[in-house]
Amino acid sequence: MNIILCGCNGKMGQSIVKNISNFENFNIVFGVDKNTNINNNFPVLDNLNKINNTDKNIDVLIDFSNPSNLDNILDYCLSTKIPAVICTTGFTDTQINKIKKASEDIPIFYSQNMSLGVNLLINLAKKAAEFLGSDFDIEIIEKHHNNKIDSPSGTAYMIANEINQNNKYNYVFDRTQKKSKREKNEIGIHSVRAGSLCGEHEIIFAGPNESISITHSAQSRDIFALGALKAAKFIINQKPGFYNINNLY
Ligand SMILES: NC(=O)c1ccc[n+]([C@@H]2O[C@H](COP(=O)([O-])OP(=O)(O)OC[C@H]3O[C@@H](n4cnc5c(N)ncnc54)[C@H](O)[C@@H]3O)[C@@H](O)[C@H]2O)c1
């Protein structure tokens, strides 16, 4: 399988490079990164537009770069009909709608968290919220390394959105300006940025005289890289459509 890797010289890109040998016949044929200063065993271009793919049979594009790269990726994949695994986080709603629109013509896998454990965490959180009902306040705390650009994390949004299927909750990110009690229909979402933390998500359900918390800790970026490579294997055989982590595990 021939892969284009966007963001190849970032932390996640390099984790893909490290893990790709676990997947038989997977090859990175082009890397794309604004920073071309790392030596890889494949050519790296600073812009996707510079790839001339007539000499390579490209099967899939994997993206761990930045939201600013999305238009390039969608233009490229739509014009070449190459499926995409989009793992970047921090897109606006307009950008997410663009991804969904593109998925009418090509298969696109999009997930803000590629790990198996987080997928389970989200399902458990959804069940807990249904089971515990409105007497329990819900707060999400996410912790990441000090280089993370977007906050709260895409995963915190995934957890909140899954709990909030009926749109009954408002998300509250900052209580410093609020001089009133917490509302019942709030989900508080809080971000910690420190050191080299790979990613931790805790969901607290606090009710009258008891509380429960569910936590997932990523101990290595490799879990996301392996998930993205599994998603790549999955997406090349799919019809055009919008796929996510629930289609994988
Ligand atoms: N879905 C997941 O499971 C998951 C897991 C971890 C990280 N992420 C997300 O993946 C993205 C990358 O994470 P990271 O930790 O590797 O970040 P990083 O900053 O280490 O790497 C990003 C790389 O993208 C490059 N880049 C930035 N803008 C670009 C552009 N317009 N064109 C080409 N290259 C560009 C940068 O030079 C850098 O090398 C982030 O959005 C992060 O939140 C997702």
Image (cartoon, rainbow, N blue to C red):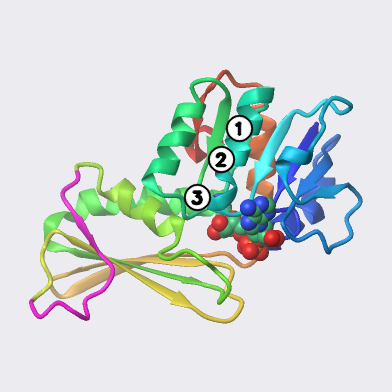
In terms of sequence position, does the residue under pointer 3 or pointer 1 come before the other? 1
Residue 57 left/right relative to 147: right
Q: Residue 112 carries which label?
A: 3
Q: Are the residues tagged 3 and 2 within 8 Å (C-beta)?
A: no
**Foreground: disc 3 or disc 2:** 2
- Image quarter for ligand 1 equals bottom right
Residue 205: x and y in percent read: 25, 65
| Residue pointed to by mark 2 | 71
Residue 177: x and y in percent read: 18, 79
Q: Please, what is the three-letter code of the amino acid marked with disc 1?
A: Asp
Q: Is mark 3 within 8 Å of ligand 1?
A: yes
Q: Residue at point 61% right, 77% down?
A: 196
Residue 194: x and y in percent read: 53, 81
Q: Which mark is residue 75?
A: 1
Residue 49 sits inside the magenta stretch? no
In terms of sequence position, does the residue under pointer 3 or pointer 2 come before the other? 2
Task: Write the start and end of the magenta stretch as one range.
Answer: 167-180
Q: Are the residues tagged 3 and 1 within 8 Å (C-beta)?
A: no
